[in-house]
Image (cartoon, rainbow, N blue to C red):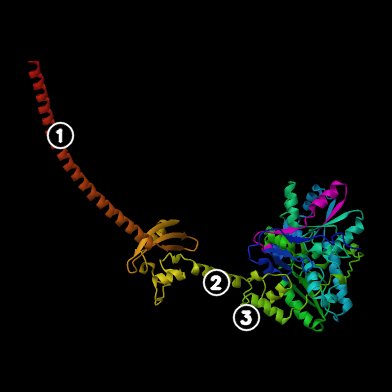
Amino acid sequence: MPSVYADTSFLQFKKVHCRNCYKCVRNCPVKAIRVINHQAQILEDQCILCEKCTLVCPQNAKEELNMIPRVYDFIRNGGQVIASLHPAYVAEFGTDSLSALTEALKKLGLSDAFDAAAGAYLVKTAYEDLVEERAQETPTISSNCPVIVQLVQKRYPDLVPYLAPVLSVMQAHARYLKEQYPDARILSVSPCISGLAQMREADNYVDYVITFSELQEWLTAVQVQVAAPSSAPPDADRDIRLSRIMAMSGGFTMAMHPSVHQRYLPACGIDSCKQILNEFMADPDSYSNCFLELNACPNGCIGGPSFRRTKTGLLHGLIRLQNASLYKGISNYKRDDFSAQSLTDVSRHYDTFVLRQQEAEASEEDIKKVLAQMGKFTPEDELNCGACGYNTCREKAKAVLAGKAEISMCVPFMRERQESYSNKIINVMPGILVTVDYQLKVIHMNQAAKDLFDPLHKRTLIGETVSDLMDDYTLVNMISFDKNMSHDQIYLEDRDIYLERTLANDRKNQLILCVMKDITREIEEKQRIRKAQNNAAAMADKLASEQLKLVHQIASLLGETAADTKVAVEQLKRTILREDEDRDE
């Protein structure tokens, strides 16, 4: 029967603009991430839900399936929900926190809550029986960690027969609870989301999965507090269950009754587990008496993603877990009796449809073509710096061919191309560019600047003191008084050139960018115009002086003429008057 979650997306990235750090690709142990148009996407058919990508994402772009609304809706409609608490709850909430945590969950509407250590007991008992049955003739890989199971299924399909045919602790406890509460739905509270992957399997008995961090957010949202656990020292009456120790690295090895001549080899951390699986796959027969207890998270389940997000103290968690698991610091098998539950069947089958289809092997010719597009023409060009997220340039080329990566993810290539392109633009620009550091040393010049200050190209200008080339007063002033911008004009006496400068202060890189323009022609034209204006003014002054002199002469002449005319008129007037007097007589 197909799972109701067959087509459900469990983990993805939010739609944000990636910052080209490629941390997610670099940290993904199976490279199940595709980057398209600067947006990272999780390839869910290849993903093993280890959550390393979302833990390292600087933008906190995690977008995982949150089942709390589904749980809430089911409870609101009268449904019964039973919580199965992964034994790691002890590290999160305290050694004696089961009763307080159960009461808090009931306030959320759940019917009851139980310690999944009972499921761990069922699993470790099945492991013990399996080891005895195989009698050191067949090696066994533990099946509890969903990440490891998916890693084997998708990357080491030939090792699937060596996986223990036993349910995980989550599924084993859920199956037991289903037998006790057939009408209830089971909510698994886990230190990670990897249990979601098991909900797609045929042997699934869990209805909902949430993490401890999600539970904390739920409790906070509805203002429910978990009562503080008892601080009393452990004693003989304490509810100690050895199977809880499975929440730490090597826990099943500590909880299982040892079998004669059997090797129990625990390992944690995805990289260590991959190394072990690689060695194991090369020659499985050499490890016939080995029980490999593999856990993807450092320090086991109490080092899971939920704990790393909430920054739960590891040492504090280890002490809490040991207090709740070990009697007086040792493994006491008698204090781990869940015999009433041993009738629950915890067998498991691995469906072949989950086996990963291997990617087609890229041809050497195609790989070389992609390498050439990244500027890698010889083996020496292959830096294998890992900045793109892949260990080698060839791995990156294969990822490009598989549609999982882009050429632009090669940081050194893009940087070189950008620098080359920038240099070309700077060198062809008509402006003169000089970059000076705060020690007033020249660190960069474009071609126009080199041609100006060293037209014969006989000097090495980079590294010289800027004062050897031009006036540095304005630069010193900008640095001293932390100015943003400045404008001035300078004169290069040895070249008889005038320059107009615009200076910008790059505080982050402690540089002064100096963009200059040769304004000699403009200055000379202004000087020519000013000289012409001065000459015209002088001529105008001279003309005005001559005109004034002429006016004075004219005025003088006009003055004498006027006086003679007046005398003549007076004489004429007297003559006329005299004639009139004679006529009257």
Q: Nearer the viewer, mark 1 or mark 3?
A: 1
Q: Which residues are magenta?
A: 55-84
Q: Seen in the image, is 441 located left or right of residue 4?
A: left
Q: Seen in the image, is 504 located left or right of residue 195?
A: left
Q: Total of numbered circles in the picture? A: 3
Q: Is residue 28 above or below residue 238?
A: below
**Which numbered tag is attached to residue 377?**
3
Q: Secondary structure at mark 1?
A: helix
| Residue density around tag 3, few if under 14, some if 14–19, many if 20 or more, within 10 Å | some
Residue 308, horizontal then vertical, whole percent? 69, 61
| Distance (Cα) linking label 1 and label 3 | 107 Å
Ranked by sequence position, the earlier of labels 2 and 3 is: 3
Q: Amino acid at mark 1?
A: Ala
| Distance (Cα) linking label 1 and label 2 | 91 Å
Q: Which residue is at the front of the view, 409 or 539?
A: 539
Q: Which residue is at the front of the view, 375 or 517?
A: 517
Q: Nearer the viewer, mark 1 or mark 2?
A: 1
Ranked by sequence position, the earlier of labels 1 and 3 is: 3
**Which numbered tag is attached to residue 404?**
none
Residue 389, horizontal then vertical, whole percent? 66, 70
- Residue plotted at (57% across, 72% down): 416
**Which numbered tag is attached to residue 420?**
2
The residue that mark 1 highlights is 562
Q: Is residue 297 above or below residue 229?
A: below
Quarter placement of the N terminus: bottom right
- Residue plotted at (76% across, 77% down): 277
Residue 566, horizontal then vertical, whole percent? 13, 30
Q: Is residue 410 above or below residue 490?
A: below
Residue 314 in view, yes or no:
no
| Residue density around tag 1, few if under 14, some if 14–19, many if 20 or more, within 10 Å | few
Residue 551, horizontal then vertical, whole percent? 20, 42
